[in-house]
Amino acid sequence: MTAPAPKKPGPQNARLEEMLRVDHAGEYGAVAIYRGQRAVFDRLPHKSDIAATIEEMEAGEEEHLKTFDRLLAERQIRPTLLAPIWNVAGFSLGAATALMGEKAAMACTAAVEDVIEKHYGEQAETLSETEPGLAETIHQFREDELGHKHTAENAGAADAPGYRLLSSVIRAGCRAAIKIAEKV
């Protein structure tokens, strides 16, 4: 096994580190959100359909997380120091929205995926010339996130009580988490 190539100093490498740290943190948080939702829905036999849908989306996020785990290790990039906070916050958000009902849980998914798919789109474009393989991976993950967003929308996300407020708060939280995870 050969050692990873030494990191190149400079702003481009620093920006790439931020991108991968944020992406890893985001996937970590997404898995936590789905686990929180499943902690509620898995215990309710009459909610087995929504639990299965959430389990399927969670499996996709876990695959994304594994990819970012590998990329951080290969490139010797530290993950966010806030992972324990993201875990608690994500699980709590997931459980809280599930307790509000299926549509609120789907509103949460739609809001998170709305921010993430745009974030991934910008990253893929930024990396397309300097890191084409990574850009393609991120583009594929963006497509997966869009699929989750469409699933949530088709399941009635916009019909959740207080949808506009709930969605706005969750999107704002995601944007703040992105900025924080870049640096911490």
Image (cartoon, rainbow, N blue to C red):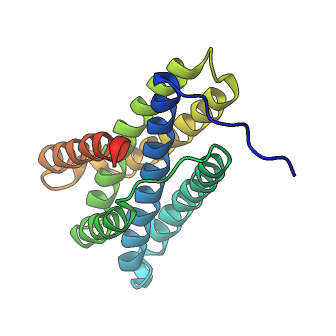
Location of residue 95 with respect to 13 vertically, above or below: below
Q: Residue 51, how many percent across, how many down?
A: 47, 70
Residue drawn 29% across the image and 58% down it: 103
Hey, which quadrant is residue 180 in on the image?
Answer: top left
Is residue 33 depicted above or below 173 in this figure? below
Task: From the viewer's perspective, tell me whether residue 160 is left or right of residue 98.
Answer: left
Q: How many marks?
A: 0
Up-down relation of residue 104 to residue 125 (above or below): below
Depth check: 30 or 101 in front? 30
Name the residue furthest top.
129
Instruction: Please indicate whether residue 125 sits to the left or right of residue 131 in the image.
Output: left
Q: At 87% across and 52% down in the image, what residue appears?
A: 1
Where residue 140 sits in the image (x, y, percent)? 62, 35
Q: Residue furthest right?
A: 1
The foreground one among 120 and 2 is 2
Q: Going 48% across and 63% down the picture, which residue do you hit? A: 54
Identify the residue at image location x=53%, y=66%: 55
How far from the left and from the top, in percent, is residue 92?
28, 70
Counting from the top left corner in percent of width and height, residue 41 is at 39, 76
User: Would you place residue 166 above or below residue 52 in this image?
Assistant: above
